[in-house]
Image (cartoon, rainbow, N blue to C red):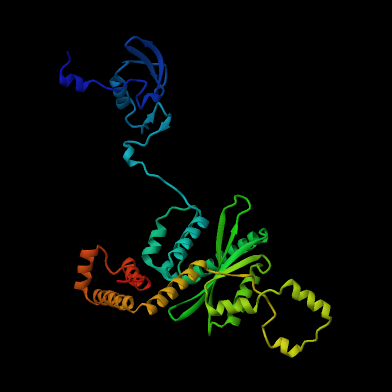
């Protein structure tokens, strides 16, 4: 039996599975020995080695071809393996200039980062490490990047208009909100894709609104946005909240009923003051049918019903106000004291986050059972 040192000295690779077997040509197989010819040597000199050993062939390569850079190859996959170790393999990928520009723009817009992010030295250093095709440098200033964003917006707007042209029906939503003492009007479009019957959506407006949010201002701005995208005669309905300004806008600028148009035709010609017509915006456009948000309506109903119920039950009203006062005091204490906030975190497992705020603010909306 072979000793442990002899077993360690025996090669474990055969000629067929050797990584450098492609430098030799198999000539003859004689039992436990094989005859091969080195393709790197001139002439027809044959070399002999054991079937389960490549020691002679390794000795030949080191002695005769030591100056050559030999490349290891997997004989079963017929693919080159990096030498000397597979750990040194590096995955190389290349991006085009257009792909990198689009990825950076998506990152800035979707994460709502300031445009001057592209001027940050660390951000530009990250971009410079991304391998791309051709000679490309990151944007050097926000002005150039702003111009690129404008081009992307115009392209996206053009693609949306083409999509809307092929849709016979769609719906919209509208809302006005305030942030940092500024008001904005947002409009989204929703439709069914005729190819795969999946619901799709797109935001078409986030416009600054100045002045009072009166019904005529809302109606005029919405009509302008609808006309810009060619949606005036394609919208089946628009969903908004129950704000009185929205409700009045859709009531005042509702499309005329077919019966009204027929009555006007029967009455004949109606004379209108041109000066008065040009001096007002009423009657010059019409808004689509209006639907009120069901969730907002249910919320208003629940709040009003709770107020009426508490007003008619004095005992429950006292318990309700006492409970909400304690919750408000607890929230005020936790928001003003770091020690109290840590205690709340230890007991509830939550700090002054949105979940905790919602729990406290939701309590006034829940009626207290009558005792």
Please state if 163 lies on the left or on the right of 270 as rendered: left
Query: What's the residue at 40%, 75% (across, down)?
Result: 309
Which residue in the rendered view is the most extreme toward the top? 31
The relative height of residue 161 versus residue 306 in the rendered view (above or below) is: above
Please state if 112 lies on the left or on the right of 350 as rendered: right
Query: What's the residue at 67%, 82% (across, down)?
Result: 282
Q: Position of residue 347 (x, y in %)?
A: 21, 64
Q: Quadrant of the N terminus?
A: top left
Q: Position of residue 277 (x, y in %)?
A: 72, 86
Please state if 97 lies on the left or on the right of 233 as rendered: left
Residue 351 quadrant: bottom left
Depth check: give the residue in front, 191 or 159: 191
Residue 30 quadrant: top left
Residue 328 quadrant: bottom left
Q: Quadrant of the C terminus?
A: bottom left
Query: What's the residue at 33%, 68% (across, down)?
Result: 359
Depth check: give the residue in front, 147 or 348: 348
Q: Position of residue 229 (x, y in %)?
A: 64, 68
């Amino acid at each position: 039996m072979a000793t442990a040192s002899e077993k360690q000295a025996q090669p474990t690779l055969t000629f067929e599975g050797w990584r450098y077997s492609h430098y030799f040509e198999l000539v003859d197989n004689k039992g436990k020995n094989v005859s091969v010819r080195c393709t790197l040597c001139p002439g027809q000199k044959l070399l002999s080695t054991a079937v389960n050993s490549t020691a002679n062939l390794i000795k030949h390569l080191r002695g005769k071809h030591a100056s050559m850079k030999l490349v290891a190859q997997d004989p079963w996959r017929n693919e080159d393996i990096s030498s000397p170790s597979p750990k040194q393999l590096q995955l190389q990928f290349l991006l085009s200039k257009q792909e990198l520009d689009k990825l950076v723009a998506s990152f800035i817009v979707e994460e709502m980062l300031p445009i001057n992010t592209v001027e940050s030295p660390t951000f530009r250093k990250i971009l410079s490490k991304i391998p791309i095709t051709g000679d490309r440098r990151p944007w050097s200033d926000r002005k150039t990047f702003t111009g690129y964003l404008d081009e992307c917006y115009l392209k996206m707007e053009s693609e949306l208009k083409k999509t809307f042209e092929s849709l016979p029906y769609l719906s919209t939503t509208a809302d006005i909100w305030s942030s940092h003492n500024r008001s904005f009007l947002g409009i989204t479009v929703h439709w069914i894709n005729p190819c795969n019957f999946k619901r799709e959506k797109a935001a078409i407006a986030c416009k600054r609104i100045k002045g009072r949010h009166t019904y005529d201002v809302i109606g005029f701005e919405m009509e302008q946005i609808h006309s810009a995208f060619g949606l005036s005669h394609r919208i089946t309905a628009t969903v908004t909240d129950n704000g009185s300004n929205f409700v009045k806008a859709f009531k005042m600028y509702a499309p005329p009923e077919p019966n009204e148009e027929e009555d006007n035709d029967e009455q004949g010609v109606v004379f209108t003051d041109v000066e008065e017509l040009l001096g007002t915006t009423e009657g010059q456009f019409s808004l689509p049918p209006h639907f009120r948000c069901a969730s907002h309506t249910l919320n208003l109903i629940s709040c009003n019903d709770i107020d009426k119920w508490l007003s008619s039950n004095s005992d429950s009203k006292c318990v309700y106000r006492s409970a909400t006062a304690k919750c408000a005091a607890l929230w005020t204490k936790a928001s003003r004291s770091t020690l109290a906030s840590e205690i709340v975190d230890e007991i509830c497992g939550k700090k002054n986050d949105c979940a905790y705020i919602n729990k406290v603010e939701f309590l006034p909306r829940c009626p207290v059972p009558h005792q």
